[in-house]
Every structure is written in C-alpha cells, then in structure tokens.
C-alpha cells in the first residue's frame, strides 16, 4: 500500500518521504500479523501460547513504524525515488515463467505442461533479459541457447538432481529403447549447435548489411 | 594440545583424500565464478550452489561448501578491485584502495596481496579455530536455554550497532526478521501461525528463498536502475607477485588485519562484517602519511582483505561450538548440515569428529586452493568482468531459479524468490538494510525455542534471565552496546567508519 501511495504522490511531482513510507509499511505489517493471529491463544508466561511471541513482535514492529512515522512527519527527510517498474515487471514475469514451465503446475482450473529446464531456462533468459532497456534480442537468444543446455548437462546429467530437463511428452513419442540420458544429450547438442550458428550469423551480418543493426 | 594434534591429523586425513581435494578445488572454482559476477555476494552464491553438494556424503558436502564460500569471498574482492562495484559490504573497503591501485596499473599486485594476505589470514584463523574449538565446545555444554537466549540477544544488538543508517530502522528490520521466522507450525502446540491457511507456509519460510530473493533478485533490480557505468580497469593487470618493498610495506598490515579479523569474527551478530572497516581505520591511523589512503595504498588492501578472510573463517566458531549461526552465510551452512542430518552444535565435535576436524582442515585446504587457482585465473576473471551486465543478469536470474528449484523441487519456492526480491527492492528504496532482517530471521526460531524452554524451567518467571550470572552478564553487555549505538558521539564515529 505504501508503494501505491508513493506512486500517486509521484504523479503530483511530490514524492512520499522515505521515513513516512517505511513507517506506514511497518504499521501495515504489524496490523496484518495481529489480524492473522487473532484466533490463536496467547497463553501466559509459564505456558506460552503460539500467538504470544508473534503478537509481541508485531506490536514491536508497529511501534517502530509509529516512531518512524513521527520522526518522518517532524522533520523533512529524503523522498522515495521512483521504482524501476520495467525491471521489476520483466524479472517477475521471467521467474513466473520458470516456475510455471519447469514442471506441471496447477493454478485453479489450469495446469501448465511440464517442459523442463530446456524451455523454462530459455524463457527465463529471454523474458528476464528485457528488464534491461539495452536488451538485444539476438544476444539473448545466443545466451539462452548456450547457457540452458549447460545447466541441463550439469544438473540433469552430471549431478542427477531430480529436476526435469526436457518436456515430459518427448518420452512418449521417441522410439522405445532411447534412454532418458540419450534424449537429454541430444537436445543439449542441438541447442549448443543452434546457439553457435546464430552467434556466427550475427557476427557476419553487420558487415554485409550495416544498416540493419 | 595432544587433542589438537590428533584432531588436526584426523582432519587432514579426511580433507586430503583425492576426492575431497577435488571437491574443495571445484567448490573454490565455481564459488569464484559466481562470486565474481557483480552484485552476487556469498549468500546468493552459496544458496544457488547448494544443490551441487546434495549427492555427496556430509563431510565432502561441507568441504565443498566451504570451498564455495571462500571462492565467493575472493570473487567479491576481485570484482571490487577490478570493477569498483563492490557487491558486499565486506569488499566495499577493498574497493577504496584496490581499485585505485588497479587504475595505476597495479591491479595484479592488489589481487596478489589480497590473495596472499587472505591465505595467511586463513592459515592463522584455521589454527585459531582448532585451538579454540575444544574449550569453547566444553563451555557451550554449560550453557542453558537462558544463556543461549541472552547470547543471541547480544548478537542481534550487535547487528544493530553494525548496521548503517538509522538505528530505529535496523531494530525494526531485526524484529521483522524474527516475526518472519515465526511463520509456520508452532513447534509446541502444532498450531498454524500466520500461514494464511496455505500449505506452503506450514514448514515456515525457507531461508535460502529469502536469501536469494533479497540478496540476488533485489540486487538485480537495483543494479538495473543505474545506467551501466561499470568502470572495469582498462590498464594492464601487471605482475601479480608484490615486489620486495611492497611486501615489506604490506606484511605488518596483513598480520594486524588477521588478528583483528580473527577476534571480531568470533563475536555473535556478524562481527566479521566489521573486520575490514576496523582494519582500514587502524591502518590509516597507524600510517605515517595517511593521505596515501584512497589513492592506492597497498596497506589499505592488505589489511582489510586479511581481516575479512580471517573473520569469515572464525565466524564458523559460534556455529561449530554453540550451534548459533552468527551471520547469513553460516545460516546456510546450518541448512546444508541439516539436509545431511547433522544438527550443528557442541555435540558435532564428539559425535562426528571426522566432520568437525575435516571441515577445519578443509578450511586451510580451501585457502590454499584460492591461492593456487585464483592467481593463474585472473585473466579469465578479467574477461568475465568485461561481459556487459545486460547479458550477465539474465544468467544470474536463471541460475537463481534453477538453484532454488533444485533444493526442494518446488516451483512455489521459485515464485517466492520473486516475491522476496520485490520486498528486498522496496526495503532498499526505503533505506532499510536487509542484513539485520536476515540475522533476525536466522536466529528467530532458535531464540523462541530457548526462550520458551527457559521459561518452562523457571516456571514462567522472566527473572531467570537476570538471576543466572552468565545470562545476566550477556544482557547487560547487550544493553551497554545498545546505549552506545544510540549515543550521538558514538554514532558519528560509526557513520564516519562506514562512509570513509
């Protein structure tokens, strides 16, 4: 809520003070904790209940917040700087894309397909890359296709960690007798080759068509 | 003394197997590789690389983790010297003179003396731990829940003293951290606390998730704010080995830094973070011509780097002997030990002597590895640091996601690093320092457990904390520290140390 307040103040050309925003945030957090714990027994000192410590801590947090609010309203402090909204959106989207695709995830009526690192890694790099205003598409493609297979090899092949590396449905469509490691290595090789190919293409292009860059 | 030597012999017999040397080497290498990336400090590095150690036996896993830790530390210093973009408070000081040396074409010497100083500090600190380990473990057995609780209060107050900026904000962050640690099932009654009815929060919040969110993702968001102005040194790296006169100039600082760091590192509440600042201030005071500082004085690199490494190492002492993690990195070590079924504390030494001594010996091996691999690889790190951030951060983002997913195989953990990333970013924007919050979170659960146990023993009387002499002394010390932190004259001095 404090960010909303902060951004609305920003539009007026005046930004909320850091101490005020911080104080509001703490008071909000304290109230939230107290509200969530409203039904838990406090207990007494010789038989502490589950809510005693969280509630006392929440009160302490609220008190800190209140003091900050006071000091923020008494003296003029620094103001909140603008948040980098673009970066936050793309980074969060990238993380959500990874979580949603690495293995099947059910959100309400929807279930995402489990696509493994092969897809999740590429998506993370491609989406996350645009958090920076100087993102370049080709660079990101080369990076995604180069780094993802490296991680697949490390986590799936060398370390044998239980992390899905490639789309599950591939197991059902390949001819019987192909081992999982075989499929994994095949995909890895394919990705490395395409990464290298795109990189090589990118190197030649600016020379032949300088105006396209 | 005989104990010490038989212990060390046992330790080296564990650490010096071919497999464990290899793992220490690998740990140092990948730790440095990730730690060199700007904006990725030891906490994020270790959390990301934790899954690499899952398939190993406990001793080997901890040896590799220790390697990752030292690698990450040294990687941070490398970045500080070459790029002047210190990711971590501890390498902030190194950047002051280290980067100036680099601009004068003496980057090699700065990196060299940092590595040599760190190695010396590491060696001394290893012995320090070995010598202090046994007596402190015995002392720890005398500690009851009240003493543990009071000791952790001292740790938290110390963290307030060490935090930059407003004392009130630091206190708030610590309390928020403890509050976060109470999320999940109540250990005694089994009732849900602050879970919002969600299954995901039943076991509480995973420390690695908070660590990567706040130190990894939030750091990316902050770095993306600034237009990229990384000033990687363009000058030649130059020779690595300091000349005789440079060495003569630097070695007293190395020795002073080592002792300062070793002592500060033992203090609960992340005293290690103070070590480089204290060392820098000391060197500046002792120097005949203090105006050289900030313009490439070799003592300004040698002292703080040694202090930093010694402190990083002796901060294992509270963990290994008392089972109290003094900082976020040690909390990750607790996590790693728990995964392998070891509960850190005084009993580790008696129950798993091979683990205890093996780890101590591997600290020394890890430090040697750093010297062996880092100096020849500096060229590679320089090249890595020339990669623009727009390419680096998507890679960091992907490593974070894969690392966090691998720990519990939970997609929701990945979502949570995004959530804590945003929280961490907001905290940075509002001038709240996240480090005290993490320490509060780390110690929160232990504190609650000990508080409740102490109160059960005393039948609900809070006086028990003042009646027991050790506990009372610790609480008085905490109070004095807190008063000192608030006193205006001391605060000025503190701010001066941090802004220098």
Image (cartoon, helix red, strand yellow):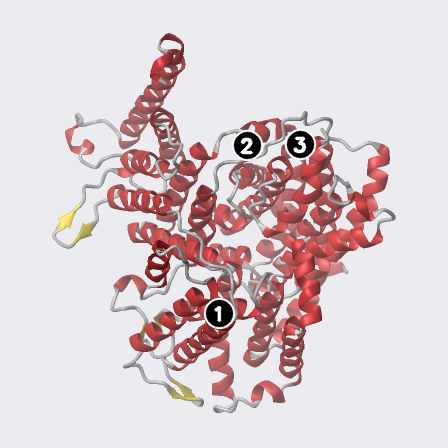
Q: Which residue is mark 3?
A: B375
Q: Secondary structure at mark 2?
A: helix
Mark 3 → mark 1, Cα distance in angstroms: 50 Å
- Name the chain under label 1: A
- Name the chain under label 3: B
> Could you say where residue B401 lies in the image, as x and y percent from the top left?
37, 44
Q: Which mark is residue A133?
A: none
The quarter of the displayed image where residue B224 is located = top left
Tell me if mark 1 has few (under 14), some (14-19) or many (20+) residues whose alpha carbon lies within 10 angstroms of its own: many
Q: Are marks 3 and 1 on the same chain?
A: no
Tag in front: 2 or 1: 1
Q: Which residue is mark 2?
A: B385
Q: Are marks 2 and 1 on the same chain?
A: no
In this figure, what is the number of numbered marks? 3
Q: Secondary structure at mark 1?
A: helix
Q: Secondary structure at mark 3?
A: helix
Viewer-proximal residue among B344 and B118? B118
Q: Which mark is residue A72?
A: 1
Mark 3 → mark 2, Cα distance in angstroms: 16 Å
> Could you say where residue A77 lies in the image, as x and y percent from the top left?
51, 64
Viewer-proximal residue among A121 and B39? B39
Q: Are marks 3 and 2 on the same chain?
A: yes
């Amino acid at each position: 809520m404090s960010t909303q307040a902060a951004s609305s103040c920003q539009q007026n050309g005046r930004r909320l003070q850091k101490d005020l925003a911080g104080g509001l945030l703490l008071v909000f957090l304290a109230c939230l904790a107290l509200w969530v714990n409203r039904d838990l027994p406090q207990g007494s000192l010789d038989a502490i209940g589950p809510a005693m410590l969280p509630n006392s801590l929440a009160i302490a947090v609220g008190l800190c917040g209140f003091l900050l609010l006071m000091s923020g309203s008494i003296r003029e402090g620094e103001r909140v700087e603008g948040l980098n909204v673009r970066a936050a959106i793309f980074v969060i989207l990238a993380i959500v894309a990874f979580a949603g695709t690495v293995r099947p995830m059910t959100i309400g009526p929807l279930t995402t397909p489990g696509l493994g690192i092969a897809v999740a890694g590429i998506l993370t790099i491609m989406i996350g890359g645009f958090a920076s205003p100087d993102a370049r598409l080709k660079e990101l493609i080369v990076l995604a296709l180069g780094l993802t297979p490296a991680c697949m090899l490390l986590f799936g092949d060398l370390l044998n960690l239980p992390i899905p590396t490639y789309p599950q449905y591939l197991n059902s469509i390949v001819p019987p007798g192909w081992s999982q490691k075989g499929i994994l290595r095949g995909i890895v090789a394919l990705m490395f080759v395409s990464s290298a190919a795109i990189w090589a293409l990118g190197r030649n292009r600016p020379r032949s068509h300088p105006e396209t860059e | 003394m005989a104990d010490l030597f038989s212990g060390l012999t046992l330790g080296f017999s564990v650490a010096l197997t071919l497999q464990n040397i290899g793992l220490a080497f690998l740990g140092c290498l990948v730790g440095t590789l990730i730690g060199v990336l700007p904006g990725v400090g030891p906490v994020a590095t270790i959390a990301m690389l934790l899954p690499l150690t899952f398939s190993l036996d406990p001793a080997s896993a901890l040896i590799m983790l220790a390697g990752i830790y030292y690698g990450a530390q040294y990687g941070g210093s490398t970045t500080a010297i070459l790029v002047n973009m210190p990711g971590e408070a501890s390498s902030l000081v190194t950047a002051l003179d280290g980067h100036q040396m680099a601009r004068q074409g003496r980057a090699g010497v700065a990196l060299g003396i940092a590595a040599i100083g760190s190695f010396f500090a590491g060696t001394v600190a290893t012995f320090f731990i070995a010598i202090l380990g046994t007596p402190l473990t015995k002392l720890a057995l005398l500690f009851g829940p009240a003493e543990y609780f009071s000791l952790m209060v001292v740790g938290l107050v110390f963290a307030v003293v060490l935090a930059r900026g407003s004392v009130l904000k630091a206190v708030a962050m610590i309390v928020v951290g403890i509050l976060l640690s109470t999320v999940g099932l109540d250990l005694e009654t089994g009732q849900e606390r602050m879970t919002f009815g969600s299954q995901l929060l039943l076991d509480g919040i995973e420390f690695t998730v908070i660590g990567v969110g706040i130190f990894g993702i939030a750091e990316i968001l902050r770095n993306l704010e600034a237009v990229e102005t990384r000033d990687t040194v363009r000058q030649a790296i130059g020779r690595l080995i300091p000349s005789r006169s440079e060495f003569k100039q630097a070695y007293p600082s190395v020795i002073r830094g080592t002792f300062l760091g070793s002592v500060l590192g033992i203090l609960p509440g992340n005293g290690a973070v103070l070590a480089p600042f204290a060392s820098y201030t000391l060197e500046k005071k002792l120097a005949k011509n203090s105006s050289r500082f900030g313009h490439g004085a070799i003592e300004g690199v040698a002292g703080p780097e040694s202090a930093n490494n010694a402190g990083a190492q002796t901060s294992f002492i509270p963990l290994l002997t008392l089972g109290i993690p003094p900082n976020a990195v040690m909390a990750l070590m607790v996590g790693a030990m728990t995964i392998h079924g070891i509960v850190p504390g005084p009993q580790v030494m008696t129950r798993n002597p091979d683990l205890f001594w093996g780890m101590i010996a591997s600290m020394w091996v890890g430090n040697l590895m750093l010297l062996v691999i880092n100096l020849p690889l500096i060229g590679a790190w320089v090249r890595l640091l020339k990669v623009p951030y727009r390419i680096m951060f998507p890679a960091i983002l992907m490593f974070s996601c894969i690392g966090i997913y691998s720990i519990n195989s939970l997609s929701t953990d990945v979502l949570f690093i995004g959530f804590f990333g945003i929280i961490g970013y907001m905290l940075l924007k509002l001038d709240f320092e996240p480090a005290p919050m993490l320490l509060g979170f780390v110690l929160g659960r232990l504190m609650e457990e000990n508080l409740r146990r102490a109160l059960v023993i005393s039948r609900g009387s809070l006086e028990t904390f003042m009646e027991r002499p050790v506990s009372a002394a610790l609480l008085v010390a905490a109070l004095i520290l807190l008063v000192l932190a608030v006193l205006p004259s001391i605060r000025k001095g503190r701010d001066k140390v941090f802004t220098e």
